[in-house]
Image (cartoon, rainbow, N blue to C red):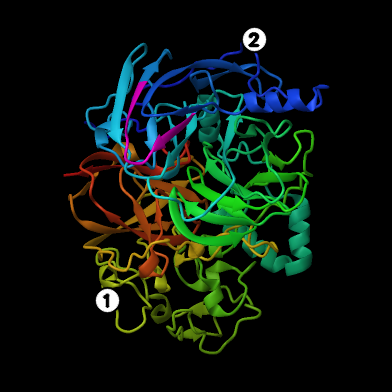
Amino acid sequence: MSSNKNPISGGVCLTRRRFVQGLAMGSAVAGMGLGARALAAAIKRNEPPVLRGTDFNLTIGEQAVNFTGASRIATTVNGSLPAPVLRWREGDRVTLRVTNMLPETSSIHWHGIILPSAMDGVPHIANDFEGIRPGETFTYHFPVKQSGTYWYHSHSGFQEQTGLYGPIVIDPIEPEPFSYDRDYVVMFSDWTDEDPTTVYAKLKKLSHYYNFNERTQADLLKDIREKGLAATWNARKMWNRMRMSQRDLSDVTGYTYTFLTNGQTPADGWVGLFKKGEKVRLRFINGSAMTFFDVRIPGLKMTVVAADGQYIEPVTVEEIRMGVAETYDVIVEPSNDTAYTIFAQDIARSGYARGTLTPDPSMRGEIPALDPVGNLTHTDMGMDMSAMGHDMGGMDMKAMGHDMGGMAMKATGHDMAGMKHGSHRMEDGAMMNGMKHDQHRMADSGMKMGMDHRTHQMAGMKGNRKMRSMVSNPSEFTAGPVHHAKTEYGPHVDMRAQAPQYRLDDPGVGLRNNGRRVLTYADLRNLRTTRDAREPDREIELHLTGNMERYMWSINGIKHADAEPLRWKLGERLRITFVNDTMMNHPMHLHGMWSDLETGDNDFIPRKHTVIVQPGSRISYRVTVDAEGGWAYHCHLLYHMLGMFRTVIVS
């Protein structure tokens, strides 16, 4: 087992996308003069097939598709995109014979499924698994120890981007704690006509190649009118020094992507039927390669009953941000004989995926306008400005008197309008005195409440300072500033957050104060008590790092190819703390073991397999190391995965 090989390709590079003639899988059926019965039948045919039982034969191959008016080749399972829905039952043992008919090595990873390492499907990391060579069959065989909504996808090359992904639904042994009349899988994904290796090459040459939402002259003039010339100049200078943009929300956007719902384009839209008064269960899965989706159904509230396949205390919301690889089960109750639009706009507001819930196959709901493009803020930089009682937008950060990722931060005498010159109480109760108001800079004593990376002390805690591993739940506290050495992580890191906070109740950029009730991680409470959850034995802190100019992603400034594996001991209990030193969201996925998210309530800790780490923030979860062998641990953004990845070895 090797830990340094390419974690997504196993040494194989996909360069096979070619132009072909063929029948589009996503062909429109609406507006073709079909009767309602024929239309309903066509809709039914366009749904992914469902395979049930314990014994499965899956064939990975190629299929002609046409989502954009140009015919392309997709990677499919049994000729379907998405791949067939696999319906298992908790307590069964499943056998899946996967035959690879591609001209290169392939694989399937069962995302979120607890199983032996040898069955996990990651070439060169899972025990004794080298991938499935062309023309060969690999048999996966494992017990099903859980229930809920999950998915599967390739872990070879960029095959996931070309269509190799599908849903998994596991029926529970015990009755579910909620009722419903209809049950639909709703899988969102992103499709590009470009060869994924071309997409990656363009990002390496110009990281914002696909970003058409960059600031314009009109934005600049608006800022000058609202903030004044000096403040605008200082703010722009700060962003430029960080080599980051307030609009760095998504690397690949709807300007090249077509967003799909169950394999259907927005022009066509997936359709699910209901009768007025029924309860409809929707199993949302974000199976995209690079896209965060903000999902809502105008006119309907959604009661979230499960997150990443695990039951939670029901919470009613109007919108959900779904990171790549996350799943949420919701129940909706349409009370009218009208059509409702399932609207999933991407985080960059460059496009959307669409579905329809309708009592009549001929009816469609209205499609709402895209929300305005969000702007990253100082909060997303890891600057806790709320604690200072004023808005820092447009302020010259050189006035802060500390290092900001290698930038000079000397005092400038810039007028910090709106600063409360009192005691400036921090959110956690720590007093931030020592402000020299004539120079408008922080005194060293005020800024050195920080993090010692050797001892992982938590600054600004209630009571005396303690080792964070002794804290019952670190997310209950506000972290103090982090002091990075100028050479820490080397020269290939854009930014290092100075005061990353636990922001579990923050819906994120583009969703704040939008007038809708948005789900946050603070809303997630395990349906069953976790009161006796074991305290962590030790903590591992991992910094998510990157360089946008060179499109390099890493953990602790080191890419996977150059990193030593993380070595964990079987049976130990860990606290994993992520600090996001970048200004992009990263959905972090640990294979083979659950991530028990610390939300501040140790009695009802929610359990996840994929955790969004927001820009400039920190987040913690507990891991019971109960699975021996080799495991992948990575950001689930496909083009980040090559660097932002670690091999975990449990022994």
Q: Is residue 93 magenta?
A: yes
Q: Quadrant of the C terminus?
A: top left
**Can you tell which quarter of the image residue 131 is in?**
top left
Any magenta on residue 359? no
State the separation of the CA atoms marked 2 and 1. 66 Å
Q: Can residue 573 be seen?
A: yes
Secondary element at tag 1: loop
Left or right: residue 359 compared with residue 16:
right
Which stretch is magenta? Answer: 85-97
- Depicted 70 relative to depicted 210: above or below: above
Q: Is residue 22 placed above or below 144 in the rendered structure?
A: above
- From the top left corner, tell me how far across and down residue 455 is, in percent: 25, 67
Helix, strand or loop at disc 2?
A: loop
x and y percent of residue 447 in the render?
42, 76
x 49%, y 84%: residue: 425
User: Residue furthest toward the bottom?
Assistant: 422
Is the residue under label 1 in contact with that under label 2 (CB below 8 Å)? no
Please tell me which residue lies in front, 648 or 308. Answer: 308
Give the x, y percent position of residue 150: 45, 41
Residue linked to disc 1: 466
Q: Which residue is rendered at x = 57% and y = 14% of the image?
A: 18
> Residue drawn at (63%, 49%), measured in percent from left and top?
295
What residue type is disc 2 on? Gln
Asked if residue 407 shows in the view, the reply is: no
Q: Which secondary structure type mostly characterizes the magenta part of the structure?
A: strand
Where is residue 52 shown, x and y percent of the image? 44, 29
Which mark is on residue 21?
2
Q: Amino acid at mark 1?
A: Lys
Q: For marks 2 and 1, give the one nearer the viewer.
A: 2
